[in-house]
Image (cartoon, grey):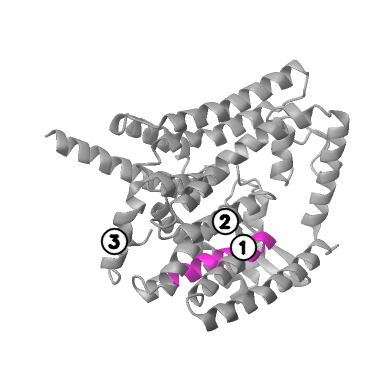
Amino acid sequence: MYISYKINKENLVSLITTLFVFVVVIDPSDVIFKLKMPLFAILVFLLSITYPKIKKSAVNITLIVFGICFITSALGIIRGININWDFAIGIYKGFLMILLIAWTNRLRILERLYLPIMVIAIVVIVTYVSMLAFPALEYIIYGMTNNVGSSLPIIMSRREFIGIPLTMVFYKTSPLALFVSGIFLQRLINNRGKIFYNLLIASSSLMILFFSGTRMNILSGLIILSFMIIQKFWNNKLGRFVSLLCLFFGIIAMGILLNLMLSDKNETSLNSKTVLSKAFSKQVEKDPLLIFIGQGAGATFDSLGIRGKEAVQSELTYQDLTRWYGIPLTVVILLIYLYPIFLIYKKRKILPYSAVLILAYTLYIAIAGTNPLLITSTGMIALLIMYSYAYNPYYENKMTLRLHNNKNTLKYADTE
């Protein structure tokens, strides 16, 4: 009777985890379902009663993060810093999901990402193709996604990419497609599972990145695709030579591409980031102490005309973190984000997707540098993917054996 009860609780945890990840990825602003916080609370409660024993290190991480938030905010109040408390509370809420690190040896986040990413792929691809086929729809979709404001998870626009006009259909959680595309590209090149299924998921995930129209998404998609192609041909001398040659010319091409992007004077986003960098420098000149102790989350600054005289956030995440927490504590936060890379690399021989997940996560961290995707529910999903992949024994030896024993069988067990 006890065993049956325990299994039921574990199944319930699995169901709520699936629903929670789906809601967070599909509705990051919580305006469609309005279920993000209720599902989070239910999940924490179920995990607490199902798996009461948690890692001490996970508790320490939570205490460190919230300690940093509260200490810097308190110092900001003492120093008379103007703080937007609505935004500050939003940052605290963004960090709440870090509580789930306590159960990452039990949670399986990665495969829960597949379904919402495929839903996003359908939305993005259908929207993109519809606008190409019926140009009149573009104005309707543009009005729907831009007039409502930033609450909708999808944005449609037109922009230029190194002088090439592009239609942009950007889903706010689209960088998470890096993880899914990497997994299924590796499955495809290693002939694991059904070829059509792997190709469909991999190509759909890449389309999310390419159709988004953002520089970092497009570059990241190209990098992860190139990495997997090189990995495919790396096992023999000729293939290694060709791969190194392609890598050499690829780095040169990437350098030229980056130079073109950074020198594009017509790129409004780049111009905005340049002005916001100057605004950060002026804020440091005005308050040099912020470099060491920050001003607290929600501290306002003069954005030099980009976002007003009492802006709370720029498009430059790591500058914002420095402004809020100071350099020393920002480094502590970033180490928490980077630590799972070290863990996965250390266990790379027993984790079959270690290399591609490290690459996908590194690219995500790079994208988050110029987009508000780090201290958000989207950023927490990326963080939990890595910690759960590092800590959950499910992904280790037994999974590797299942992958080899069931190459032609498509199950959750062999799609991780």
User: Which labelled disc corresponds to residue 401?
Assistant: 3
Q: What residue does disc 2 label?
A: 175
Q: Badges 1 and 2: C-beta atoms under 8 Å apart?
A: yes
Magenta extent: 199-220
Q: Badges 1 and 3: C-beta atoms under 8 Å apart?
A: no
User: Is 137 above or below relative to 299?
Assistant: below
User: Is 275 above or below relative to 49?
Assistant: below
User: Is 386 above or below relative to 328?
Assistant: below
Q: Main secondary structure of the magenta part?
A: helix
Q: What residue does disc 1 label?
A: 220
Q: Where is residue 104 in the image (x, y as percent from the top left)?
A: 40, 41
- Left or right: residue 332 versus residue 304 is left
Q: Position of residue 62 (x, y in %)?
A: 51, 30
User: Is 354 above or below relative to 24?
Assistant: below
Tell me the kind of residue under disc 3.
Leu
Tell me the kind of residue under disc 2.
Pro
Outermost residue, bottom direction?
238
How far apart are the two marked residues, 1 and 2, measured between alpha carbons? 9 Å
